[in-house]
Amino acid sequence: MSRRPSLVTGIDIGSRHVRVVIAERVPGKSAPHIIGRGSAESKGLRHGYIINIPDVVRSVRAALGAAEHAAQTSVGGAYLAVGGVGLEGVVASGSTIVTRADSEITEVDVKLAHEAAESNIPAPLAANRKVIHAVPLQYKIDNREVLGRPLGMHGMKLESKLLFITALEQHVSDLIEAVEQAGVDVLDVMASPLSASFVTLTSAQKIAGCVLANIGAETLSIAVFEGSIPISLHVFPIGSTDVTNDIALGFKISLEDAEEVKRGGTGSLSYPERELHTIIRSRLSDMFELIEAHLKKIGRSGMLPAGILITGGGSAFASIEELAKTALRLPSRVAMPNLPGNTAGELRDSAWSVAYGLCLWGLAAESDEEPMGIRVARHAKNKLLDWLKQFLP
């Protein structure tokens, strides 16, 4: 199999599955054409972070091989999602005195204000972490808020407020090492919740305000959007595997049987449907309580007009939309990947949202008309990969 330069590949390494999507650029179209995908059981991970690199390498190779076989091509480089409980968002502010004598604000001033904000991240939240995205939330010139970017305006003092999305340095380093040991160069990294948002949220939803909740096997990640940009991000160590465990304990059955029951199968055994629903609803309620507590913390409880959009492998539970609506007092629905021309079968499964989003991000790499979320994330990379690769063998 040969490599084709027009391809873009996304790799999502989750706690339960590794998913790889290979897409091809189509001239004149904004969405990539999916030509191959592959998945494999994840091994060597816990709550999204790596505990055994060789096991992860084998999982990545298996998923990659399936995708390459389907696409009839080989992958040289890929975009990688970073998730897990080591991912966190923190808001910090900083200021600088405008450097030019005529008080015109330049890129230098903006950079200095961003660096000042980053230096003000509380020490406990910065230890052993690396900033992977820096999203500007607000600028002020001489204590007066300005709309948009402050470049070209005039003033004596520039203040900036940013959302810094950070990840544990060791976790990101291990992810990159695993993928590169599998024979693929990592072109860039992106936080999983942001990647999923590219194919599950509309511009109108991001502008009005919404929360995207990704229910994975062992983690629940949320990203809150308002005014087109992410304003908060958090990952909780709870996921659909906890539902499986609850079913196993409730009915005194094996984990394998509990997983089958959770997915709607009963095999040769029957279980009280009402009791099963009670078990599932109880754990899902725990998840939505965590989301509600976070929304209260950032002052957005019951105040997001576009509501909650639920995605990920754990979004398929019956009545999950009604549960979310009741718990959060917000409109709710399960969000499906929105990729024109790729509507058949498993290509609409929301569990693939992160990998799809990485393909869209890669497709926009050289575009001058990138969506704001993509542009902010890419410009905030700050040579992360160069910094990390110096520590890789």
Image (spheres, helix red, strand yellow):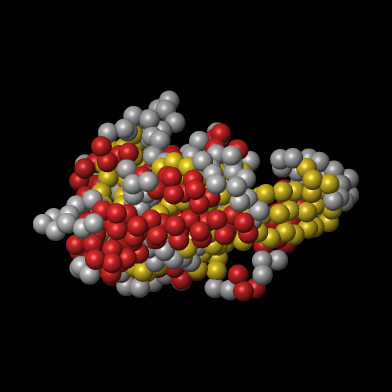
Rendered residue at 55%/69% (across/down)? 129
State whether residue 63 is above or below residue 348: below
Q: Nearer the viewer, residue 172 or 283?
A: 283
Q: Nearer the viewer, residue 231 or 377?
A: 231
In the picture as drawn, the residue positioned furthest to the left comes out as 268
Left or right for 50, reference 91: left
Q: Nearer the viewer, residue 301 or 95?
A: 301
Can the viewer see residue 167? yes
Left or right for 11, reference 211: left
Counting from the top left corner in percent of width and height, residue 99 is at 83, 53
Q: Could you tell me which quadrant the N terminus lies in?
A: top left
Counting from the top left corner in percent of width and height, residue 192 is at 45, 53
Rendered residue at 44%/31% (across/down)? 30
Can the viewer see residue 191? no
Left or right for 349, reference 369: left
Counting from the top left corner in percent of width and height, residue 13 is at 35, 58
Q: Quadrant of residue 255?
A: bottom left
Q: Could you tell me which quadrant the C terminus lies in?
A: bottom left
Q: How many marks?
A: 0
Rendered residue at 37%/63% (across/down)? 218
Rendered residue at 69%/60% (across/down)? 92
Q: Quadrant of residue 6?
A: top left
Q: Quadrant of residue 57?
A: bottom left
Counting from the top left corner in percent of width and height, residue 387 is at 52, 64
